[in-house]
Image (cartoon, rainbow, N blue to C red):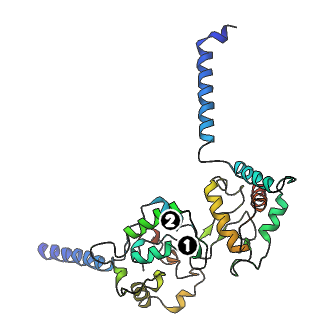
Amino acid sequence: MRLVFSYEFWRVGVFAIALGIFAGLSGSGHASPPASIIDGYLAEAKKGNSAFKGFSPERGRSLFFSNNTTGKPETPSCTSCHSKNPINAGQTRAGKEIAPMAVSRSPDRYTDPKKVKKWFRRNCKSVLGRICTPTEKGDFLTFMLSQ
Amino acid sequence: MFRTRMFSVAAAILFITTASIAVADERYKPIQDKLVSKECGSCHMAFQPQMLPKRSWGKMMGELQNHFGEDASLDAADVDHIKSYLEANAADSGWIGGKFMRGVKDNMTPLRITETPHWVYEHDKEVSPKAWKDPKVKTKANCLACHPRANRGYYDDD
């Protein structure tokens, strides 16, 4: 009982609350984890189809390895630049190295929503010749998180 | 005796410094803008803006959705920011035109640095056609293959 009113108790309590507030603030800041980006695509996917069950790493895998003729001839597949294994580094057509796509190898990937949006916009157009659906984006990210 | 030796040492120093000044003229201010470095350097090395005229950067930033066959589109705010930096530091941004303005006529808007007269002159005189076929070069846009400090604006190491 004495502990509750002790100075030490309050000091620890105030510190814990301050820590909680700080963590909350920095959590809602710029560095959002991949999960929250995926949640955004999930909401969009459900809007289009109320029976939507959830994202699938297998569908993400087949999208990543698919060969397409609807996009640019130089880039028929994601693997044209990102290598045939997500844990390996890729190479741009201009010769610059691309960090591996797998979250296990590149932990800071898919944490910046603006960057994720930019590259889906650019690369879906290059590879598929169209924008990707929210389901495709969610599947892709789910696959990369599993790698 | 001492005097002669001093003289030859001084002469040697003078010779070395002037020789290096004469050679060391392919240096460009490194890019100092974070967004420019990041966005222009995602797929290739971010080339120094001193290598193309203002009008070239303006045209390029207006057609990013087809950037040499790639979609390099950005949101409007980032396009504006990058474009102003490139134009402010372009080959013709100073009161006297930079080296990359040599031979660029008023009606020319080069988009590839590798097609500017200055670039062509500098590479034709020293690079054999065979060197371009080296697999580590891959493309003429890959400055770093032969100039390891190119991203810091230093091209004097040939």
The amino acid marked with disc number 1 is Leu
Discs 2 and 1 lie in a common subunit: yes
Q: Which residue is mark 2?
A: B79
Quickly name the residue at label 1.
Answer: B64
Q: Earlier in the sequence, mark 2 or mark 1?
A: 1
Decide which of B78, A143 is in the foreground and name it: B78
State the residue at coordinates (61%, 72%): B71
**Can residue A114 be seen by looking at this rendering?**
yes
**In the displayed structure, does residue A125 sit left or right of residue B68?**
right
Q: Chain of mark 2?
A: B
Quarter of the image where one finds residue A78? bottom right
Q: Amino acid at mark 2?
A: Val
Marks 2,1: beta carbons within 8 A: yes
Q: Is residue B87 found left or right of A5 in the rendered image?
A: left
The answer to whether residue A95 of the structure is visible from this angle is no
Q: Is residue B77 above or below residue B60?
A: above
Of residues B141 and B131, the one drawn nearer to the viewer in this rendering: B141
**Residue B148: where, in percent of width, then height?**
48, 72
Task: Give the residue at the far top of this rendering.
Answer: A2
Q: Please tell me how crowded label 2 is: few (under 14), some (14-19), or many (20+) other residues with Cα within 10 Å.
A: some
Q: Nearer the viewer, residue B5 or A48?
A: A48
**Residue B23 position within the rendered picture, expressed as x and y whole percent measured from the top left:** 32, 80
Left or right: residue A93 versus residue B153 is: right
Q: In the picture, which quadrant includes the N terminus of chain B?
A: bottom left
Report how many numbered discs are placed on residues in the image.
2
Q: Quadrant of the C terminus of chain B?
A: bottom left
Q: Residue at x 82, y 58 (%)?
A: A57
